[in-house]
Image: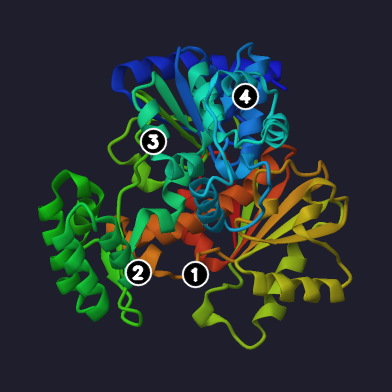
Amino acid sequence: MVSGAALERVRGVVEEVIDALDRWGELVLEAYPGFGKTLLGVEVLKRFRRGVMVVRTRMEMDVAVRMARGLGYRLAPLYGRMTLCPRGFDGDPNLFSALCRARRLVGECVERADGEALNLCSRASGLEELREIGRSRGFCPFRAHVISSLSSGRIVTTYEFLYRHPEVCSRVRDWDVAVLDECHALVEDAERLVVRIDREFVWGLAEALKRVDPRACYALRALSRRWGEPSEVIDVLEKVVESCGDRCSELERVVDGWRKGLAYVDRSSGAIYVATEPRLDVGSRRLLTTAYLPPPLARGRRVLKIEPREKRVRVIVDTSITTRFRERGPNFVDELAKAIARHVDRNVANLVVVPSKAIAERVSMELALRGYSVAPPEAIERASEGTVIIDVAGGRATEGVTPSKSLRRVVVAGMPYPPPSPELSALAKLWGFEAVYTYRALLRTVQALGRLTRWGGVGVLIDRRFARYVDRLPPWIEVEDVS
C-alpha cells in the first residue's frame, strides 16, 4: 500500500513540516498530485500521541487507515450514524437525521456505551463488523464506536462528520495535531459557509429560545409572520443577540457579517444570505494540505510549496471558441464538438470535461454521430484506446478514482465556472469574484488535468478565457502553446 519511493519523498520533508507546526502552530502544504500528501499527513500523525486526520470521503478514510497500518500503527476510523446504522439507509442525510432522532426518542433505537459495547466496538475490524454488532446485539453502535475510537488517540474522519458533530470537535480541539487533507474542502461547500436567513430560519430560532428567553421567542415569531425589509430583520436579530449573550455567539457572527456588508439579498424570496469565514477548530497544531491552494486559505498563513523536479502535465490552450453563455451562437454545440474532435487522440483513452450535464449529453450525441466511441464517467478505470469518456467538471471521472493506464489525453472544453447562486454571491462579497467563481473554475480544471499525473499525457484547454489565467495554474502544469 505504501511504496518505498513515496515514503522516501514524504520523509524528506516531514521534519520540516513538524518543525513549522511546532514553531507557528499552523502550516499549509501545497504539493503536486502524486507527491503523497495523504501519506505525509499519516506520517505526521504518527509522530504525535493524539491526532486527527480529516478527509472528504469514506473511501479516503479507508486509504488513510491502510497507509497507517503500513507504517505500523493504528489509525481509528470515525464513522457517522448514517454509515453505521444497522437498519441501513441510502437517502437524504437530513431525512436520516430526523428519523434517527425520532427513533431514539421513542426508544425504537437504543444506544449503549457500557463495557461490553465498548469492548466489542474497539475490537471490530471494520465498518461491516460494526454494523453486524449493531444488528446481532440489537443496539446502535454509534456512541460506543465514537468513545472507543477517540480513546485510541489517533483518528480519521470526514469534514461532514465534524460539521454534524460539534461535540466531537470540542473533544479533539486540544489534541496535538490535526491534518486537514484536501483543505480546499473548507471553502468549497458554499451552503455550509453561508447562512440563509428566512422565515423558516427565524421560526426555528424562536422555537430554540422558547424556554430560554420567552421575550426573544415572541419577537422572532412575530418577525417570521410579518417578514419585513432586510435591515429590519437584522435589527431584530441584533436585539436577540444582546438579550441572549454568549448563548447566541454563532448568531452574533451572522449579524456582524451583515454589518460588514458580507451579505446578498434574494429579492424574489426575501431571504438574506450572509457569508462567514470557514471554521473547523480542531487540533492545537494544524497542517492543511492541497494540490491547488484556495486564495482565502492563503491569507495570513505560512505556506510550504513543494514543486516537482520537472513539469508533470503538458497543456495547450485552444482559443478558437468560448463556452461563455452570452457568446454562444445557434450552432454552439456543433462548433464545440468540432473543437473537441480536433484534439481527441484515437490512439489513447480520452477524458472530455464540459461545464454542465446538458452540454455533456449534446456533445456525446454529436461525437457519437461522428463515429467516436463515447463512454460514461464510470468507464474511467477501464477505458481502452480510442474511447472518449465525457463527464461534467467536478464529476466522478475528474478526481479520486484511479484512471485506466490508457488515459493519456484530457480535454477541458469550456472554462467550468459554477452557475451563479445566492450562496456564491454572498461569498463573493467576502472574498471577491475571482477568489470564489474563478477559483472554482480553475480548481475543476486542475482536478481534471491531475488525471494525467499518474500515467502522463497531454491536456487541452478549449476556451479563450483560459488564456487570461495560464499564470494562475500550479507549477506542475506546463503550458506549451496558446493559439
In the image, what residue type sits under mark 2?
A: Glu
What residue is shown at x 45% (from left), y 12% (from top)?
49
- Point out the frontmost of discs 4 and 3: 4
Of residues 368 and 75, which is closer to you in this image? Answer: 75
**Disc with the residue nearer the chain's start (4 vs 2):** 4
Q: Residue under label 2, please give it.
A: 200
The tag on residue 167 is: 3
Give the distance between the C-alpha atoms of the residues marked 3 and 2, in whole angstroms: 25 Å
**Disc with the residue nearer the chain's start (2 vs 1):** 2
Question: Height in image: 73 above or below 414?
Answer: above
Task: Using residue 457 as the reference point, say whether residue 230 is left or right of it.
Answer: left
Q: Residue under label 1, please give it.
A: 419
Question: Quarter holding the C terminus?
Answer: bottom right
Would you say residue 214 is visible in this rendering? yes
- Point out the frontmost of discs 4 and 1: 4
Give the distance between the C-alpha atoms of the residues marked 4 and 1, in whole angstroms: 44 Å
In terms of secondary structure, where does tag 4 sit?
helix
In the image, what residue type sits under mark 4?
A: Cys
What residue is shown at x 62% (from left), y 69% (from top)?
356
Give the distance between the C-alpha atoms of the residues marked 4 and 2, in whole angstroms: 39 Å
Give the distance between the C-alpha atoms of the residues marked 4 and 3, in whole angstroms: 20 Å
In terms of secondary structure, where does tag 1 sit?
loop
